[in-house]
Every structure is written in C-alpha cells, then in structure tokens.
Amino acid sequence: MSLLSAGVIMQGWQSTFLGIRQLPKELSAFELQAFFTFSRAELDLIHARRADTHKLGLPLHIGFLRLSGRLLDAKRMVSATLWRHLGAQLGIASPELASLKALYTREATLMEHQRMACDVLEFTWMSEHQRRALVRFVRDEVARSGDTDQLLRFSRRWLYEHKLLIPHDRTLRSILTNALNTIERESAEAITAELIQSVADFLNLLANLVKAWNTMQMQQVLQGWPNRRQHVAPELMRKIAPTRTEGINLRGVFRFPTERYASAIMPSLATSIRTRSA
C-alpha cells in the first residue's frame, strides 16, 4: 500500500516534485513506494481495465498525479525501473517502451486515464472561488516573502493540499503577478492617503492657530475699548462669538476638507484620491 494512498498528504520531502511536468529519470525505492504503490481501491480500478497496456498506463497517471499534482501527457519518457516496479505490482510483464506515446494510440484513452486518476485521488481543476482563495493566501505570504519563486512553491503546495490540479507555471505566475500588482497598488494608495492626511493635519493646525491668534487679537481690542470710553453696541458683541467666552471659538475646531482640496495639497496625487473617493 502506498505511503500516501490513504489521502493526499503533503510531505516536506515531496515538495521538490510538485509542479514537475515529466517523470523523474530516477526514483528511489522509498519514492516508488510512496507514489507508485497503490491502495486496494486503486488496484481494483486498475485491474478493471481490459488490456494489460491500459493496466500499466492508468497507474502511471495515478502515481504521477500523486507525485507532482499535475496530469501526465503521452509525450513523457518512462524509466525501465518504473515499468518493472509497476509490472511486479500488477503481475504483468513490463513493456519495452521508452515513452507513453506508443501506449496511447487513442487520445480518448489518455484523457480517460487522466480523468480516472483525478477521480480516484479526488483532484479537480481550480474554480474561480478557489482562485480568489489562493490570492488571499498569496497576500498573507507576501508579508513573509516577496520572492516570486518562493511564492510559486507556496502556491503549488497550497493547491496540492487542497487537491487542486497545479496549472502550467505560466498560468500560476500570471495569478501571482496580478495578486502582487494589486497588493502594490493598494499599498501605494494607503501611503498616498497617509501623506495627504499628514498635509491636511498640518493645514488644520495652521488654520486653527490663525483663528486662535485672530480671536486673541479681537479680544484684546474689545477689552481696550471700555478703557477708552468707547461704546460697543450689544448687537456687535453678539456677532463676535469668540469674545463672549474669552477667546474660545464657539464654532468648533476647524477641519481641512481633504477630499475637496486634495489636488491643491498634492496635485500629482489628485487622480488617485478622486478614484478612491468615487
């Protein structure tokens, strides 16, 4: 029975095989046992094939999917050691074939074996919902490592552990690139917002200082009027609210409207502010 046949469990030593596109030229006895030795359910499925060639072909697909997380195509080379290992398990003479191409004269048979391997190991193609989950995983990993190759390895492992077929590297890199671009854009927008808020805070402080200074000056002038026996009309006093509370501005603290004046604060960033506010 395979070391992994009870379930597709990600082992640390196995990660070097994830995403490979062809069978390794050499596999150790331990690796043959782990990937190309089969459970009873898998053997029942294999022995249900009619021709001996098909009984040898299907286990190759099951083993390769368990090994790499990818589908095996008919152009790949197969080592004599692996053929002998399969033949000994199944009680079938190992063929003198260098590749799978001679084994699959019909593409439909190849596709059927790929599908059966997916079914028995419960692998599926990644859905849109699962792609978004992968992107969320990548976002979390970026905090620890922004290296693309490292993220590729993490992504392959995540897909394998979730029993999702690992796509071509070009597809996976495209997903990672889009995720990284989104993260960079959001980070830039956050920094931009922080910079603009810093400028706005300074303007708030400046505006309130000016208002406080004006209030103080107004208060001093009004306090001096009685000493000069200058009459101050009551309606005028009512209009100057700060003077009635010894310099406190009753209208509240001034807040500079960042959204309205972003282009004046930092003209080069006006576009991104308008986009975020929309």
Image (cartoon, helix red, strand yellow):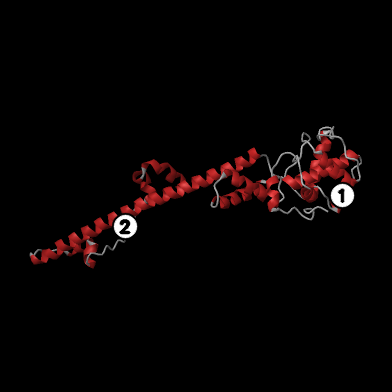
Residue 278 in sight here: no
Residue 165 appears at what percent x and percent y? 71, 45
- Residue 85 in view of the camera: yes
Q: Residue furthest left?
A: 228
Residue at the (59%, 49%) spot, across then down: 138
Which residue does the image show at 80% across and 45% down from the upper left?
Answer: 62
Amino acid tagged 1: Leu
Q: Nearer the viewer, residue 272 or 198?
A: 198
Residue 251 is left or right of residue 11, and the answer is left
Badge 2 density bin: few <14, some 14–19, many ≥20, Cα 10 Å: some
Q: Position of residue 68 (x, y in %)?
A: 72, 45
Please give the residue where the numbered disc 2 appears in the rendered image: 254
* Residue type beneath disc 2: Phe
Q: Earlier in the sequence, mark 2 or mark 1?
A: 1
For mark 1, give the secondary structure: helix
Q: Where is residue 157 drawn, in percent x and y? A: 67, 49
| Image quadrant assignment for residue 23 | top right
For label 1, the residue is: 43
Q: Residue visible at 21% across and 64% down? A: 243
Point out the frontmost of discs 2 and 1: 1
- Answer whether labels 2 and 1 touch (C-beta < 8 Å): no
